[in-house]
Image (cartoon, grey):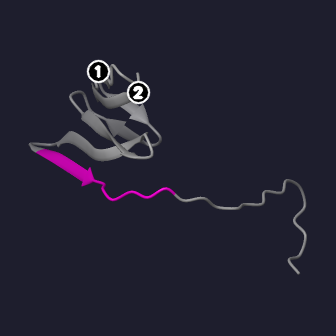
């Protein structure tokens, strides 16, 4: 693989990342073909946090090229309370 990172020179936060697969690779029961490309753009949207705003995935499929684009906006900051227990679970009361 080879790729690039974009960095905000004021905050040193990553603002973009892209890569291209340079040879066929087997991953998680699937295959990424040579030439597969992935890119993500991050936007400083919520309280100074950079979050993904656009994901692009391109891969050859036989004679065709498959392109998947996802865009995200209007993200909101929220909090949650969680409880994690390891070991035998107790019946909820």
The location of residue 47, given as percent across then percent down, is 45, 46
Q: Quadrant of residue 31?
A: top left
Horizontal side, residue 33 vs residue 13: left or right: left
Above or below: residue 48 compared with residue 73: above
Q: Residues within 10 Å of mark 2 (few under 14, many from 20)?
A: some
Q: Residue at x 28, y 26 (%)?
A: 21
**Residue 70, magenta (yes or no):** yes
Residue at x-position 54% and y-position 59%: 78
Q: Which residues are magenta?
A: 65-77
* Residue drawn at x 90%, y 70% as measured from the top left: 90
Q: Position of residue 64 (x, y in %)?
A: 10, 45
> From what the image shows, is residue 25 above or below residue 45?
above
Question: In the structure shown, which secondary structural element does the residue marked by tag 1 occupy?
Answer: strand
Residue position for label 1: 3
Element type at marker 2? loop
Q: Please tell me in which quadrant of the rendered image residue 11 appears.
A: top left
Of the two numbered discs 1 and 2 on the same chain, state the one appearing first in sequence: 1
Q: Residue at x 64, y 61 (%)?
A: 80
Which of the pair 77/56 is nearer the observer? Answer: 77
Numbered label attached to residue 13 = 2
Question: Residue 91, position in %: x, y?
Answer: 89, 76
Q: What whole-number distance in Å separates the C-alpha atoms at marks 1 and 2?
A: 17 Å
Q: Quadrant of the N terminus?
A: top left
- The tally of labels here is 2
Residue 87 vs residue 13, the one in the foreground: 13
């Amino acid at each position: 693989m080879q790729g690039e990172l974009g960095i905000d020179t004021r905050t040193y936060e990553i603002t973009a990342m892209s890569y291209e697969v340079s040879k066929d690779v087997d991953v998680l029961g699937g295959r990424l073909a040579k030439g597969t490309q992935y890119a993500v753009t991050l936007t400083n949207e919520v309280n100074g946090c950079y979050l993904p705003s656009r994901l692009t995935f391109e891969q050859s499929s036989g004679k065709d090229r498959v392109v998947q684009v996802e865009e995200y906006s209007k993200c909101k900051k929220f909090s949650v309370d969680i409880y994690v227990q390891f070991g035998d679970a107790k019946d909820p009361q």
